[in-house]
Image: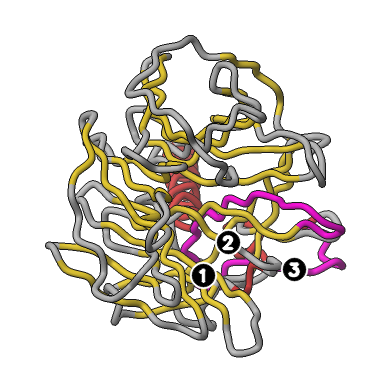
Amino acid sequence: MLSPEPQTERRDALVASVKATVAPLFVLVFVVLGVASRPALAQSYSLRTVDFPGDAFTFVYGINNAGQVVGGYNTQLRGGHDHGYLLTGNQLTTIDFPGATDTDLSGINDSGQIVGAYIVDGSGVGSKGFLFSGGQFTLIVFPGAQFTIPVAINNAGEVVGYYFAGGVGFQGFLWNGGSFVPVPPPVGSGPFFFNGINNAGQIVGNTSSSGFLFAAGSYSFINKGNFTIASGINDAGVITGSFQDNNNVTHAFVLSGGPGGKLVTLDSLGLVQPSPSAINNAGTIVGSYQRPGGGQLGFIASTISLLDPVDVDPSNSLLNGPAVTTDAKLLAAKGRPVQGVAADAWRRDLRTRSNHRNRSQHGHRSQRP
């Protein structure tokens, strides 16, 4: 994200054209083991690593229910400038705030409205937030703040994020229809951040030590390890985030059933220093993790529900060499029981072929003397 710098002026709104370029995106697609033990029904993930060619840093910050993703990228390990992007399928569109040296896109709703922040180096003005909708930019700047960072937007156009205006430090905000909506802070929290909002208006975030859910006017806290961040929430109330354990190792997690519900880590993804940012209604989680050798890579983890979801077998000729698969036919060929959408499609195919075979045999029999 953009680092804070002093702000000396405030503008209420800006309408400008978008600078956009379209480029192919390099993604590495592979499938990993689920996060539940077998043989119970597991929640597994198909993992896409998002890496724009030549980049040192690729961040994934937001995702909507159509699977569109937003974030930022930077081509240099030190220095350089961030550029915002919209990823639709495998097409990446760069979106930079006009005149900005750095732009990050942090959230997107189902209408394609995007929020983010920008900065102009050397201007003496701190980071400013914006809403990008219908090809136009509208500023989101908290009054008197040195910088403002919008993070997420729901389908009603409600925006959450955080700002810095000195005093007690970082503060979360809710913005809607051009105005900031008063929201009480967590009691005794000091600095706090709003990181995500769903279509019911439920907000997740964190204090200096705990994650939280803000719903129906009250806070419920999430405490795991030494430090917890709640970063995204979908319409089912499923929360994603991260925590640091007693050995200072960072773990990504999915939490269902509210702050007192079932928390499952995503350690099986094998990501170093994972930082989930958002989760959509399909359960797809996006975020970033540490790139080997320095920098950051983005990730998109899509859910797969299978009983025995993957098969890794370098000697398996069915998979044509080293591979990981969720293909129901290949799993069935190895005698693996499968469940879920892929299995249903496979069973329909089997029934179709079986019915065709039965009809064919019946026709041949009727023609016999």
> Taking the image as drawn, is residue 91 in sight?
no
Q: Which of these two is toward me, 301 or 16? A: 16
Around disc 3, counting alpha carbons within 10 Å, would you say few (fewer than 14), some (14 to 19), or many (20 or more)?
some
Look at the numbered discs 2 and 1 and tell me whether their residues touch, using CB distance below 8 Å: yes
Let me know if residue 131 is in the magenta part: no
Indicate whether residue 306 is drawn in magenta. Answer: yes
The amino acid sitting under disc 1 is: Ser
Is residue 140 visible to the viewer in this orientation of the structure?
Answer: yes
Name the residue that disc number 3 marks: 312
Q: Which residue is located at x 71 percent, y 67 percent?
A: 272
**Crowd rating for badge 1 (residues with CA inside 10 Å; few <14, some 14–19, many 20+):** many
| Magenta region | 291-318
Secondary structure of the residue carrying tag 1 is: strand
The label nearer to you, 3 versus 1, is 1
Disc 3 and disc 1 in contact, CB within 8 angstroms: no
Picture coordinates of residue 132, whole percent (x, y):
41, 24
Nearer the observer, 25 or 120 = 120
Q: Residue furthest left?
A: 216
Disc 2 and disc 1: Cα gap in Å?
6 Å
- Disc 2 crowd, CA 10 A, few/some/many (<14, 14-19, 20+): many
Identify the residue under disc 1: 242
Residue found 67% across the figure and 35% down from its top: 82
Q: Between marks 3 and 1, how big is the CA–CA gap?
A: 28 Å
Residue with the mark numbered 2: 275
Q: CA distance from mark 3 to mark 2?
A: 27 Å
